[in-house]
Amino acid sequence: MSAAVDPNQYIVKQEPYYQAVGDEIALYEAAYSARMPMMLKGPTGCGKSRFVEHMAWRLKRPLITVACNEDMTASDLVGRFLLDKDGTKWQDGPLATAARIGAICYLDEVVEARQDTTVVIHPLTDHRRSLPLDKKGELIEAHPDFQLVISYNPGYQSLMKDLKQSTKQRFGALDFDYPREAIEVAIVAKESGVDEKTAAKLVQIAHRARNLKGHGLDEGISTRLLVYAGQLIGKGIAPHAACTMTMVTPLTDDPDMRDTLNAAVQTFF
Ligand code: ADP
């Protein structure tokens, strides 16, 4: 038996700032009260993780977040036997811990994980609400408060890499996108500390860049990057340099595309 985990360590203690863009808070609350597994869809850096943190805080549930990657195995989620000086000891993985303590378990970018990893979530996301620990010979009945949430970036999906319908159809889903202009300005100002006028310029630049998605850019400039730009400007970096560092260089290595983005920056700063 692994040592009991203190759920308090996973409680979100301070309110994470989240600016609602629609009725997503009410919809999520209803989904949680039905313990419905949820899928948050949208481009990177548009507020999905922040939303889950905010909801965990609102619902007063512990939150366990797992950043998924292609090397992740089912054992990384479920648990494994570890060797220590006293012999072998079972160590719950984050999914098992969340199921035991009644946490919200957030699997970020779950599509990155291999399909054999993804199927371990199946029995937790239907009427069974259980997690078999095959190696240990234990079946965890999920705590009544447990909920599974996954994020999914539709832009990255390809035929090779996508969730199977049998996985997708276990979730209710909410669409996320970059917030509309006035809201994004408010977020960037609040999160980075720049004034609204500067935040508005950053958002305008992002709008231009987002139009280039599919025309040389794989993804538009995320809200996260706008916050970064604002933070550097707040540190006294000249706006143009701040924007290049956060809104141009990370996005692309293509010299022409960088010129185009820098020209957009120059229009405003
Ligand atoms: P994702 O999980 O979609 O990749 P995040 O939730 O990490 O993105 O969002 C990136 C950053 O953008 C956050 O750290 C926060 O500063 C900001 N942000 C985006 N949307 C919102 C929002 N609606 N309310 C508050 N902050 C937001």
Image (tube, rainbow, N blue to C red):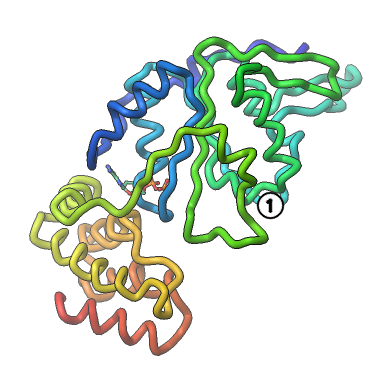
Figure quadrant of residue 119: top right
Per the image, label 1 sits on a secondary structure element best described as loop
- Nearest the eye: 195 or 220: 220
- Nearest the eye: 41 or 267: 41
Is the residue at mark 1 in contact range of ligand 1, meaning its CB lies under 8 Å from it? no
Vertical comparison of 167 with 236: above or below? above
Which residue has dot 1 on it? 70
Q: Which residue is rendered at x = 40% and y = 24% of the image?
A: 31
Residue 149 relative to residue 185: left or right = right
Residue 192 relative to residue 254: left or right = left
Q: Position of residue 113 (x, y in %)?
A: 66, 47
Looking at this view, name the residue that lies furthest to the left.
Answer: 197
Q: Which residue is rendered at x = 47% and y = 80% of the image?
A: 253
- Nearest the eye: 85 or 205: 205
Q: Which residue is rendered at x = 53% and y = 42% of the image?
A: 108
* Mark 1 residue type: Glu
- Nearest the eye: 118 or 242: 118
Vertical comparison of 173 with 191: above or below? above
Quarter occupied by the N terminus: top right
